[in-house]
Amino acid sequence: MLSPLFAEYPTFLVFLAVFAAIVLTMVFMPPWIRFLKSSHIGQQVRDDGPETHLVKQGTPTMGGVIMLVAVVVAVMLIGFPSAETYVLIGAILLTGALGLFDDASKVIHERSLGLTPKAKLVGQFAIATVFAVVAVNFFDIPPTVPIPFVATLDLGVLTTVVPIGEGISLPWLYLVFVNILLVGMCNAVNLTDGLDGLAAGTVMIVMVVMAAIAYRTDLLEPAIVSAALAGTCSGFLWFNSDPADIFMGDTGSLALGMGLGCLAVLTKTEFVVIIIGFLFVAEALSVMIQVAHFKRTRKRVFLMAPLHHHFEKKGWSETKVVIRFWIISGVFAAIGFSIYFAASTMGVM
């Protein structure tokens, strides 16, 4: 562990986590790609997707496995592992395992759909619920949702105390909110992962901001975890840029989404994270709007959902969509951080 050597330089530790995750990802990804190719483990492309994506058929997937390994090694090597660290990493890894099972199902059955939506949601809700209960009862996370410059919503008004040990509090409204937030982010990032470099680039931007927020909140461990997540996304981009040598799969995208939601809970930015990660929200909303409108009218609002495919259908190149979405993600991440910074400085958050 390097943390004792640089304990007086926490900023350096955060940057070191980024560097370590980048290096680990770039070192271990090439042999993983070779293994996947030799094992004929490749992506199954949707038949109804953009025609230009058919060439991606068979591209190695499950790159998220190496990303998660890099994050865990970097955090354990750089940080001061605490209970919060283990629970945060545990939630990320469990969600990644759920995604891995889904990816494996796709490969084995040679289809673009793995687990049923219901099965994935059950697993995600279970992980989110356990994390929320642990956060409230053992990490003293208040069951509130601060909305900067507006109000702080108290979602602990309906609380049940289960007589186990010193008592386990179950703030029902807050648990519902956190479940929606975490599961929503999981699937929003997953939906964003549809173009080469799109999810990795946008998550990298968002995680840098989350690391800054955690650091400013004096939460060094979550800052290091967030920095490691940003670093592994950066390293993964080397192999995932167009044309991609490997995809992260649900193993990576679901885990990254869960990590983002959990970090928001620990840093009490449950509302602000919706602004910071608004690109993911927009991608998810585009699917919801498309499905709801089509069921009602049999007509489509977008040429294709999620949103990035709509612009592909309009004639934008894949690279143009990705770079412009990176820029949009950066704008919203900056807006979200600015709101957080102003609110925390003025003492209204």
Image (spheres, grey):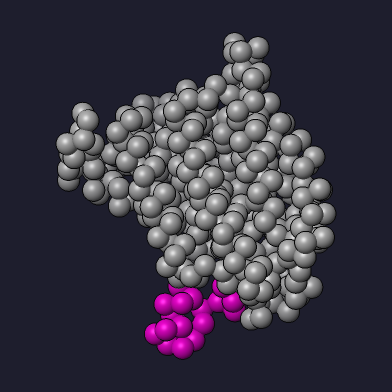
Report the number of discs. Answer: 0
Residue at image position (40%, 39%) is 265
Q: Nearer the viewer, residue 276 or 252?
A: 252
Residue 261 visible to the viewer:
yes
The image quadrant that residue 192 belongs to is: bottom right
29 magenta-colored: no
Question: Residue 56 location in percent, x, y?
Answer: 76, 69
Residue at image position (66%, 18%) is 2
Question: Residue 176 location in percent, x, y?
Answer: 30, 52
In the image: residue 342, left or right of residue 14 = left
| Above or below 264: residue 12 | above
Question: Residue 159 location in percent, x, y?
Answer: 18, 42
Which image quarter is the N terminus in?
top right
Region rendered in magenta: 289-309
Residue at image position (65%, 31%) is 74
290 magenta-colored: yes
Which image quarter is the C terminus in?
top left
Question: Residue 232 location in percent, x, y?
Answer: 68, 41
Residue at image position (58%, 40%) is 207
